[in-house]
Image (cartoon, rainbow, N blue to C red):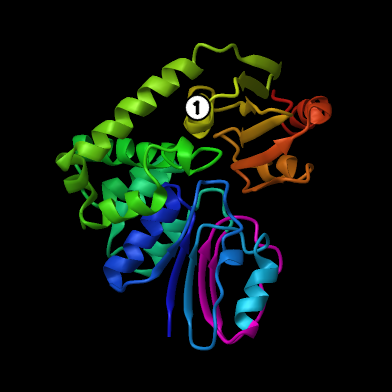
Amino acid sequence: MRFYDIYNGDADGICALLQLRLAEPREATLVTGVKRDIRLLERVQAGPGDRLTVLDISLDTNRAHLTRVLDAGAEVQWFDHHHAGSIPRHPALSAHIDTDPAMCTSLIVDRYLAGRFRLWAIVAAFGDNLDAPARALARQASLQAAETESLRELGVCINYNAYGESIADLRYPPEALYRRLRSCADPLEFVRRGEEFAALKQASTEDLSRAESFPVEVLSAGCALVTLPNEAWSRRVVGMFANRLAQRFPRRAHAILVRRAQGYLVSLRAPLEHLRGAVSVAQMFSSGGGREGAAGIDHLPDADLARLMEAMKQAWPGR
């Protein structure tokens, strides 16, 4: 029997896995990557009796390889909040999927574990820009304001670390960061220990400062976009910058475009006051996907830029 932990390399995927392994410690083969590397099941050659835990990647995107590993005799436990499509019925598949816009994978795991390691769920919710649910859980946990702020900053920093074209763009490989975080059962202890957290905080602050120097193009009362250059720092900060604009203008949707050699990489955020529509807009394009509140397009050809802008104006006209 072999164990595989397959997870998105962002704050939500990492914190979901941390909760599960604190509850059920075991060594497993780790399968992860940058945030947009979501076709992770194709890397796994599973056989009879193998057990796969899959976190924070779309079932629909991995459907063919899910069928393959189930047919091979593996058992699969799946936690996610992205668009899933039809969930297969199979005795070896245990699916915990909730696509509510106010939900993230770590909150689903928190519910599954009855809140046993809630601080990590709070970290993840902040990282996924779900500040209201995160703060509600922080109040339930009787956290002090300074503790809540530390968890918020940690979630933002872990999430920042996941964005890039490849592992080379990141400050820490997601597998290495997970192992460092796992050495601290308490996220507040990881913050106090300081080294990795301080490095990520400084790097994210520098990258965000660069991004905020670029102009915002308002498309309608309800949406806007920003175009960043083809640079590693742009790819790193795209998600954090999109979340920052969403918080600053909660009635407005945003698209952050990062120039590529040909076309763009796109990060979409629905208005925080109405977390709907991001995945519908993204799925109008062949490489698009995500969830209602946040989505992305891996490659938007230059010729499709006008179509994206029109789709945003239709989805979020504003009022």
Quick check: can you spot residue 84?
Answer: yes
Whether residue 196 appears in magenta in the rendering, the answer is: no
Q: Is residue 285 above or below residue 23?
A: above
Residue displayed at 57% across by 60% down: 40
The C terminus, quarter of image: top right
Could you say where residue 168 lies in the image, as x and y percent from the top left? 47, 39
| Magenta stretch encompasses residue 86 | yes
Element carrying mark 1: helix
In the rendered view, would you say 193 is above or below 265? below
Q: Which residues are magenta?
A: 71-98
Answer with the quarter of the image where residue 86 lies. bottom right
Quadrant in which residue 178 is drawn: bottom left
Query: Where is the N terminus found, in terms of image quarters?
Result: bottom left
Instruction: Give the residue number, with chain letter if any, for mark 1.
Output: 241
Residue ID at (66%, 14%): 217
Q: Residue at x 63, y 46 (%)?
A: 292
The crowding category of the residue bearing disc 1, from other C-alpha atoms within 10 Å (few below 14, some 14 to 19, many at least 20), is many
Where is residue 317 drawn, in percent x and y? Answer: 74, 26
Q: Is residue 166 toward the left or the right of residue 15 in the image?
A: right
Q: Position of residue 92 (x, y in %)?
A: 56, 84
Residue type (three-letter) at the residue carrying disc 1 = Phe
Query: Looking at the image, how many numbered discs can be counted on the residues?
Result: 1
* Above or below, comparing residue 260 to residue 280 in the picture: above
**Can residue 129 be seen?**
no
Is 37 displayed left or right of 116 in the figure? right
Q: Is residue 273 above or below residue 85?
A: above
Where is residue 166 shown, x and y percent of the image?
53, 42
